[in-house]
Image (tube, rainbow, N blue to C red):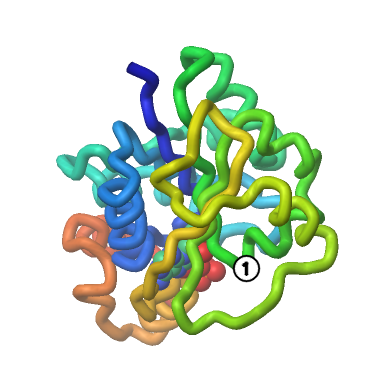
Amino acid sequence: MPKRIGIFGGTFDPVHIGHLRSALEVAELMALDELRLIPSARPPHREAPQVAALDRLAMVELAVAGLAPLCVDDRELKRDKPSYSIDTLESLRAELAGDDQLFLILGWDAFCGLPSWHRWDELLQHCHILVLQRPDADSEAPETLRNLLAARSISDPLTLKGPGGQISFIWQTPLAVSATQIRTLLASGKSVRFLVPDAVLTYIHAHGLYRASN
Ligand code: ATP
């Protein structure tokens, strides 16, 4: 049986219940064998993360412990280069059987920014793309993506066939939590209890992360 593997990248600075709830819902809906959270080392599209890669990795590991099929993949942290998704996909593909299914999970905003990604037009050679869409979102895809969507998108994500090549949408109401909000709360000495798993909270305090002086 081909495996079904989802990949969900991010800075996870820190990982929070929004990421985890969303990942879990996708994993269940899509009956994934694995959903790999992939912390990025040096994200090409944004500022450097506030805390060290090893701390971000440790927090994601704590967050998904015992939560199969959620798991962590640290390959982007082992690479001494910017974290380009195409490199990650190529290296994953090299480890998988040819018929294993890969699902790259992207928020709608990230999906709309796809044309600025390194070798973006090759991504679908390696995976399907699952776009997380908010029920309240009404923005239109940029011009460059409209042809691609017309040619490659299908409405029911459960009917995606084969190892890759198609795009589908998952409608999900995200929890109103962001890592930015969590960093801000911590920097001002406020609690982030219930916004991150307890094990992550313990790690943050034990290592003195995100304090105003960091
Ligand atoms: P920041 O506030 O630092 O920008 P973030 O909370 O958006 O961080 P990232 O690590 O940048 O977290 O996000 C990784 C992935 O998780 C992205 O695809 C992003 O769209 C998604 N994501 C972020 N917050 C949520 C949320 N509350 N619910 C569902 N998905 C989320």
Q: Quadrant of residue 118?
A: top right
Please tell me how many numbered marks the rendered image carries.
1
- Image coords of residue 200 (percent x, y): 26, 58
Pointer 1 residue Cβ closer than 8 Å to ligand 1? yes
Image quarter of residue 120: top right
The x and y percentages for residue 30 are 34, 45
Please tell me which residue lies in front, 184 or 18: 18
The percent position of residue 214, horizontal first and vertical second, equals: 49, 68
Identify which residue, 151 or 26, lies in the foreground. 151
Q: Is residue 2 above or below residue 106?
A: above
Figure check: 116 above or below 65? below
Tell me the crowding category of disc 1: few under 14, some 14 to 19, or many 20 or more residues within 10 angstroms, Cα based. Answer: few
Residue occupied by mark 1: 109
Left or right? Give the position of 83 relative to 98: right
Q: Residue at x 50, y 68 (%)?
A: 133
Is residue 13 visible to the viewer in this orientation of the structure?
no
User: Residue at the location (38% across, 76% down)?
Assistant: 177
Q: Quadrant of the N terminus?
A: top left
Q: Is residue 98 visible?
A: yes
Q: Is residue 122 left or right of residue 70?
A: right
Which residue occupies the extreme right position in the image? Answer: 144
Question: Mark 1 falls on what kind of element?
Answer: helix
Looking at the image, which residue is at 30% across and 32% down? 33
Position of 145 relative to 140 (above/below): above
For badge 1, the amino acid type reads: Asp
Residue 146's spot in the image, x, y percent? 77, 61
Task: Report whether 121 appears left or right of 193.
Answer: right
Residue at 56% across, 51% down: 154
Quadrant of the rendered structure where residue 19 is?
Answer: bottom left
